[in-house]
Each structure stands twice: as C-alpha cells, then as structure tokens.
C-alpha cells in the first residue's frame, strides 16, 4: 500500500515530541523472561487504574509477552541508555548480565529502574500496524527517584530543570588553573615555531580551549573558551589513561557504531597511546565543513539532530588520523595533540598545535611533537 504522505517526514514530525523510555517485561508461556523497549507507555485512567503502550504487530517479543500472566513497565533512568539499547534490539540475549527480581506476580523488575508498574492485560486491540495494549495496574513502586531517560529527535537525553543560576563547572575553573601553570611554555612554542598552541581540557564530553597562544601564520578558528563536542575519533588524546568503561562511552558517541568502525577507533586509540601523540593530517579545505558544523553546533541548542550532523562530519575524518610519518615525506598537518599524563582528581588536559601553513617534512613534525611532549611533561611535573 502506498502511503498518502511522506512516512519519513511523519516520523520526523512525531520525533519532535519527547517521550520517556520503558522496558515492558514478562515471563511468557515457556517460562523465560522477555522484554522490549517502548516509547509509547502512557497513563490512561485512574479509576480503574489503566496504563497503555503500543507494540508493533510484528514484534516477536510482544507476541511472546502477551502470553504472560502479568507484565511490568520498567521506567528507565537516564544512566540506563546501554540497557535500553540492548532491549531495543531483536536479539535473544537481552537479559544477559541484566539483574532483576520478580514483581509480586512474577514479572521482571530490572535493577536500577526509576519506577515499575505491574499490570495484567486488560485488552489488546489492533490499531493500524500496532496494537493498543491496555494494562490493569496491580502494583507499583518508585525504586530510585532519579532523572528518567528521555528520547527526542531520534536521540537519548535527560531532563534539565530551568534555573536562573548558570550551572557551575568546577572542572572548567580547575582546568583553566592547570593551563595557567604552563602558560609560559605554551606561548614559547607558539612564538618559536610560528604556530598556534593551545591547552584543551576535557569538560564532560566537550573539549574546551582553556588557553590559547596564536602566533601561527594561519588564524586559529577556535577561540579561547570554545567547545568541541568529543566524538570519536576526536578527543582520542583524552582517552589514553581512561578506564575501559569511559572508552566504551567514548566509542558509543560515534554515529551508527558498527563493530568495524569501533575497531578502527580502538586502533586509533592504541596508536596514540603507543606514540604519545595524535596527528591529524590533510589539507585545510578538508576540515572546512567540520569547522562550520562544530561552530554552528556551539551556537545551537545542541539538540540530538544537530549533534547527529556533527557526529557525521566528525566520523568522516576518521581515516585522516594517525598517519605513519615516513622520513623525507611532506605532510599537510591540521593538528598535533599531546596528552598530559592524567592527574587523579583533575580534569584531563592536552596540548594542541594548529595553524600550520603548507606542507612540512616528517622531520619537522617530529621536532614539533618533541616540543609539545616537553610541554606536556613539564605540565605533568608541575601539576603533580
Ligand atoms: C526509544 C525507543 C522507543 C520504542 N518504542 C516502541 C514502541 O512504542 N512500540 C514498539 O513496538 N516498539 C518500540 N520500539 C522498538 C522496540 O523496542 C524493538 O523493536 C523491539 O524491542 C525489538 O524486539 P523484538 O524484535 O524482540 O520484538 C522502540 C525502540 C526505541 C529505541
């Protein structure tokens, strides 16, 4: 059947309406637990207490769940995105490693959820390509009164209350102090080589310029205070001392991360860890689009759709990272970044060189890397 309208636009228009995210769980006829993610969970009636969700007609999970005596609506918390992704796939292993306990009628209550509502099926009616599943509430509780996970414009996020006070960012202030301690060294590199040299700090998942010295022959497109969202492979220098969990989170920030892409980003990270620096090599025009997109993002509300555009532009640069530096060859260098050894309890910082005009020899690049590594070592020494 051909649709009387553009289905993609329809989805996009509806995607502008935010929803919470819940996992419907139950133990079906053959005794095994099942679960599926829904964004369509809603309250319907207080007397009698009814809730609803809309499962698609072709969901194998729902076909099985409807055979359960009872089901449980698990309202996910903002730190359960990983769990959400697992329960939104069609795979069997959804419950592997997921802790749960049975509700009074035996439906799984997942560990860490905000709240749960146990129901029996009141009615299941067809509605287009979905069902309207009505649940009669039997029991419920708030397990963890924390921020829920939200879904909006195809991306996950969380609620932030409006506040007149600017959010304090103690990490940023601390990072600016750390950078100040090596101002002389950063400025010396900038003047000596006629390049731009800056200190970048990892603040949340942004790389922030906390100190800049711009003696380069090419103007620095990134100003003091400017933020770049960390999306693989960017921010790789911040990941060298990170925990496996943090590295997973970093990898998860790339768009549509398939296993091969993840592997590529891991190799980039291994290379930076081995060599102690990160190099991005290509002609300046290649980065024009990326720069524009990042700058536009900074000025925007940073909504999921805008983030998607930055993710795409960033991931396209992946192959330009960490080239071999072959002796005697010439390179066009966009940036060199050297991480400062992590100082426990302090934000991660790195030294970045940009503003490099024309092609340069690999020998020259090596000299710059050494100079930046010296600044990074001085920083680590001074800040200990
Ligand atoms: C945020 C989000 C909301 C979803 N909402 C629904 C929904 O309301 N109804 C539905 O049938 N599927 C929804 N899905 C898709 C299902 O979670 C997914 O198709 C299902 O879990 C796949 O499992 P199955 O193939 O084992 O049935 C949603 C997925 C996500 C990521």
Image: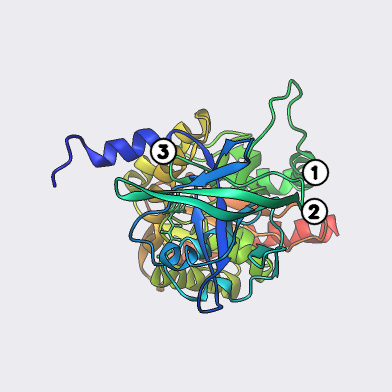
Q: Residues within 10 Å of mark 1 (few under 14, many from 20)?
A: some
Residue at the right extreme, as displayed: 384
> Distance from label 1 to label 3 (Cα)?
38 Å
Q: Secondary structure at mark 3?
A: helix
Query: Which of pointers 1 and 3 lies earlier in the amino acid sequence?
Result: 3
* Residue 105 in picture, x, y percent from top left: 67, 64
Q: Secondary structure at mark 1?
A: helix
The quadrant in which the C terminus is found is bottom right
* Circle 1 residue: 174
Label 3 vs label 2, nearer the camera = 3
Q: Are marks 3 and 2 in contact (CB under 8 Å)?
A: no
* Residue 284 in picture, x, y percent from top left: 36, 46
Q: How many marks?
A: 3
Q: Is residue 19 above or below residue 382?
A: above
16 and 340: which one is in front? 16
Q: Secondary structure at mark 2?
A: loop
* Circle 2 residue: 346
Q: Residue at x 57, y 52 (%)?
A: 22
Q: Is residue 325 visible?
A: no
Q: Is mark 2 within 8 Å of ligand 1?
A: no
Query: Which of pointers 2 and 1 lies earlier in the amino acid sequence?
Result: 1
> Distance from label 3 to label 2 (Cα)?
38 Å
* Circle 3 residue: 15
286 and 353: which one is in front? 286
Q: Residues within 10 Å of mark 2 (few under 14, many from 20)?
A: few
* Residue 363 in picture, x, y percent from top left: 47, 66
* Residue 325 in picture, x, y percent from top left: 43, 70
């Amino acid at each position: 059947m051909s649709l009387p309208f553009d289905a993609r636009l329809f989805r996009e228009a509806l995607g502008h309406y935010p929803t919470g995210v819940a996992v419907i769980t139950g133990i079906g006829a053959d005794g095994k637990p099942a679960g599926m993610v829904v964004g369509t969970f809603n309250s319907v009636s207080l007397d009698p207490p009814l809730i609803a969700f809309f499962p698609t007609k072709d969901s194998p999970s729902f076909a099985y769940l409807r055979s359960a005596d009872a089901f449980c609506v698990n309202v996910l918390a903002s730190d359960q995105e990983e769990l959400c992704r697992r329960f939104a796939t069609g795979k069997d292993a959804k419950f592997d490693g997921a802790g749960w306990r049975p509700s009074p009628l035996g439906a799984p209550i997942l560990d860490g959820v905000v709240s749960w509502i146990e129901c029996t099926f009141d009615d299941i009616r067809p509605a287009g390509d979905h069902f309207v599943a009505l649940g009669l509430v039997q029991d419920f509780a708030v397990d963890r009164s924390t921020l829920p996970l939200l879904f909006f414009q195809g991306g996950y996020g969380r609620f932030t209350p409006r506040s007149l006070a600017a959010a304090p960012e103690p990490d940023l202030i601390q990072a600016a102090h750390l950078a100040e301690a090596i101002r002389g060294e950063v400025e010396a590199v900038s003047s000596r080589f006629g390049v731009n040299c800056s200190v970048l700090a990892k603040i949340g998942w942004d790389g922030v310029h906390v100190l800049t010295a711009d003696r380069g022959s090419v103007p620095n497109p990134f100003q003091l205070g400017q933020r770049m969202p960390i999306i693989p492979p960017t921010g790789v220098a911040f990941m060298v001392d990170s925990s496996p969990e943090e590295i997973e989170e970093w990898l998860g920030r790339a768009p549509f991360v398939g296993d091969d892409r993840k592997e590529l980003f891991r190799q980039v990270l291994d290379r930076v860890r081995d060599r102690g620096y990160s190099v991005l090599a290509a002609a300046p025009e290649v980065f024009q689009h990326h720069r524009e997109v990042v700058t536009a993002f900074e000025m925007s509300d940073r909504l999921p759709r805008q983030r998607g555009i930055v993710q795409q532009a960033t991931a396209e640069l992946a192959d330009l990272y960490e080239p071999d530096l072959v002796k005697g060859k010439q390179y066009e260098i966009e940036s060199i970044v050297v991480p400062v050894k992590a100082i426990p309890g302090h934000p991660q910082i790195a030294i970045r060189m940009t503003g490099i005009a024309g092609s340069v020899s690999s020998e020259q690049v090596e000299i710059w890397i050494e100079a930046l590594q010296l600044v990074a070592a001085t920083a680590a020494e001074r800040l200990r």
